[in-house]
Image (cartoon, rainbow, N blue to C red):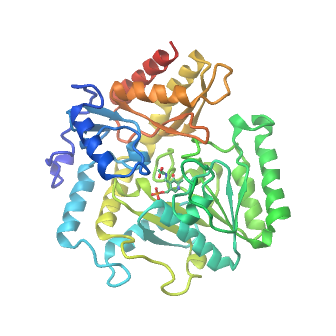
Amino acid sequence: MVQTIPGADRPGTDLIPQRRRLVTAVPGPKSQELMARRTAAVPPGVGTALPVFVERAGGGVLVDVDGNSLIDFGSGIAVTSVGNAAPAVAAAVAEQAARFTHTCFMITPYEGYVEVCERLNRLTPGGFQKRSMLVNSGAEAVENAVKVARAATGRPAVVVFEHGYHGRTLLTMTLTAKYRPYKAGFGPYAPEVYRAPMAYPFRWPGGADRCADEAYDRFVDLVTTQVGADQVACVVVEPIQGEGGFVVPAPGFLRRVADFCAGHGILLVADEVQTGFGRTGDWFASTFEDIEPDLVTTAKGIAGGLPLGGVTGRAELMDAVHVSGLGGTFGGNPVACAAALAAIDMIEGEDLVGRARRIGELALPRLRALAERHPQVADPRGRGAMLAVELVRPDGRTPDPALLADVVRRCAAEGVVVLTAGTYGNVLRLLPPLVIGEDLLADGLDVLDAAVAAALA
Ligand code: PLZ
């Protein structure tokens, strides 16, 4: 099928062999040269996790400028779920770019935008009538969800959670919990943002068993005694926290938060920017907690690598905003919409949601085995193709970010890209493309095993 898609023979699409292959040290000389140019041209405020410059990519492999083929366990932070340069996405992009690249949906609309919204309305949790709007990024999606929530409720306050991440704009940076690197030096922050503890089982002071109950009590206490439930427009929560360390909330916690919100006229915004589009083995992670959020934010994996985000919500809430209160020049760009339609077709047509579950079935036991071998590897967790472990001291608990950095460096040196996360900088996370081959996945996990063993030797 792939061969019949126009553009499938273009370099950088499906012709890249799905295997790990090193021909120089990583980073190689060409990457190092480019890194020197980067340092002169780009400020350090824009970070670089791995100083390896990519020349092309396909499926689950990144090919660098020195000719090394690296296994991609990051998907550009959960973006290239359908594979990098997926032929169907590349073809849809080329076709749309040749027809028109932009009109601005607010000036003269086009069908692709409407169709992406129709699909979001159909795929997101909740059987009720919905509407969607499109933006350029996850942060913009969260910003707009809060705008809608405030307009619909007439209330000012927003409640978020410890370890949460929602973006880097003023409002979303304020919603984000972690100070460094996201907030340091960038205050004053936006007003009317309140933070409740997250039900983080591994690190809950009273222990995992009491986590859901105690965290829920703390949440209710904050909302009722410090904020005023009738002042809260919305609660914004990631159904599995991403940058905060793939924290899977204690079972039952989110369900009770959702019920509390429903009982007090507070809107529940599920930030599914990282968890969405099949990543966790369901279309959206809210489903695991049996939650139907009032508003859902999406981005990342929606468009096969092109920048696109969305806000989807109950029709009556989305319709509460006055005409022209929402928008932006580029929001829902036609090329990004074409990519999204191709990516969603792929997720549906190739059952990539099922593939995400399969990746979890293969990789989570490997992480558990790693944790059994080493007390420094703790709390294997996550769902589907969104998996993590904490690297800790031999006490099994104290975060060890230096150990994580060492493991990540060793993985990269052997040609495997893994990502970090976590409030304490000690979470190793895996976000492979959902199309990754099982051999490639196994090879990457073998490299990880060896990297951990070497770092601890
Ligand atoms: N909400 C849940 O995970 C983006 C951030 C990378 P944007 N996460 C990756 C970084 O260091 O900047 C994210 C997310 C959740 C919102 C966002 C923001 O999405 O597309 O990066 O704006």
Relative to 71, 8 lies left or right? left
Residue at x-position 39% and y-position 71%:
331
Q: x and y percent of residue 105 in the render?
A: 36, 79
| In the foreground, 395 or 363 | 395
Q: x and y percent of residue 138 in the render?
A: 48, 60
Residue at x-position 63% and y-position 73%:
149
Residue at x-position 55% and y-position 46%:
242
Q: In this view, does 215 lie above or below 110?
A: above
| Residue at the front extreme, as displayed | 40
Q: x and y percent of residue 444 in the render?
A: 38, 27
Relative to 168, 347 lies left or right? left
| In the foreground, 72 or 436 | 72
Looking at the rendered structure, the number of numbered marks drawn on it comes to: 0
- The answer to whether residue 117 of the structure is visible from this angle is yes
**Quadrant of residue 99 within the rendered picture:** bottom left
Q: In this view, does 368 lie above or below 106?
A: above
Q: x and y percent of residue 85 in the render?
A: 26, 49
Relative to 220, 176 lies left or right? left
Residue at x-position 38% and y-position 82%:
106
| In the foreground, 123 or 236 | 236
